[in-house]
Image (spheres, helix red, strand yellow):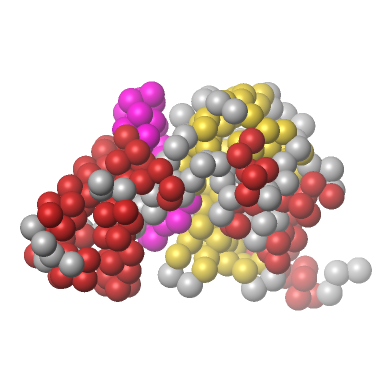
Amino acid sequence: MLNPTRLSQLFYIIFAIFLVASHSPKSFAVEINIDDELFELNRINEHVLIASQAFGNTRINFGIVIGTDEVVLISSMMRRNVQSIEELVRHVSGKPISKVIVIDSDPFHHNGSGYFKDKGATVIGHENLLSAKVAIDIGFSSDIVIDVGTEKIRMTHTKAHSQDHAYVTLENSNVLFTGDALRNDWLIYSGKNGWKTHINELRSIREQHTNNTLYVPGNRGKHISSSAQEVDRLINIYEEFRQSVIKLAREGLSSEAITREDEITQLLTSFERYEEFEPYIIHHVEEVLAFSH
């Protein structure tokens, strides 16, 4: 039998789900606390929700797609939080999680997937995840389409961010989960393929989708998603940063000196979390220079 505290918590969850049911992500967000974990829910339509979990000032996005008879979870989040996520999904949909999509080998995308697999879910991701020791049930090389009745979910491999990365397109809803290939509050981490390749991959993604596509980054600040126009602006900032770093290095400036240059600081102050992440600019400078030869 549920104790009064638990009953109160469940009532709050159900009430919050009722509120989110009639609002779009641009106009309304509901915050829900489950077992001391803070989640934010934004409903795109009747079968797609963007969920975010709070980690300090950062919020990490994951997706809930409600199919005809099942739920697909886009990114499992961390193992320690899976029961809270399971409860959240249950109250949103009343349906079981049958599939878990792994966007890349970052722990937030896959760490909890084993829990859902043990409960009968199928784990799907790019085949390179296996070499990163991430367990999957179904792997793919280029792309894969999952049809759950209400939504066609396409996973597409990309060289942005990591060798095992895939972005996820909800074709019926025109929503794209970018994972760590994009963030709207700060600079990207390009991984082994370098900044130029990463930026070119983002441009390719934009070219393949409409100007009305909604982009959902993995890590975020205040804004849960970005418009296509905002993504264009971000890509331009990434490219200007890359070119400026290379130019300043060729002029003889050290990595540390580059971080203090006016053209760098003026470019990056447009980011929401500049003051918080300013000490880490040097890591991005060094990452750009590692692939500039």
What residue appears at the point 13 percent right and 65 percent down from the top-left corner?
A: 253
Quarter of the rendering occupied by the N terminus: bottom right
Task: Kindly identify the residue that appears in the image at 45 percent across and 65 percent down.
Answer: 58
- Residue 243 x, y percent position in the rendering: 17, 47
> Residue 78 colored magenta?
no
For the image, the number of numbered tags is 0
Report the front residue among 226 and 282.
Answer: 282
259 or 117: which is nearer to us? Answer: 259
Q: Nearer the viewer, residue 26 or 62?
A: 62
Res 66 seen here: no
Magenta-colored span: 201-224
- Compare residues 35 and 159 and report the one nearer the observer: 159
On screen, residue 158 above or below 116: above
Residue 159 at what x, y percent from top left?
44, 37
User: Residue at 18% of width from left, 52% of height from top?
Assistant: 246
Point out residue 250 in the picture as x, y percentages from the top left corner.
12, 54
Relative side of 16 to 273, left or right: right
Q: What residue do we see at 77% from left, 32% from top? A: 69
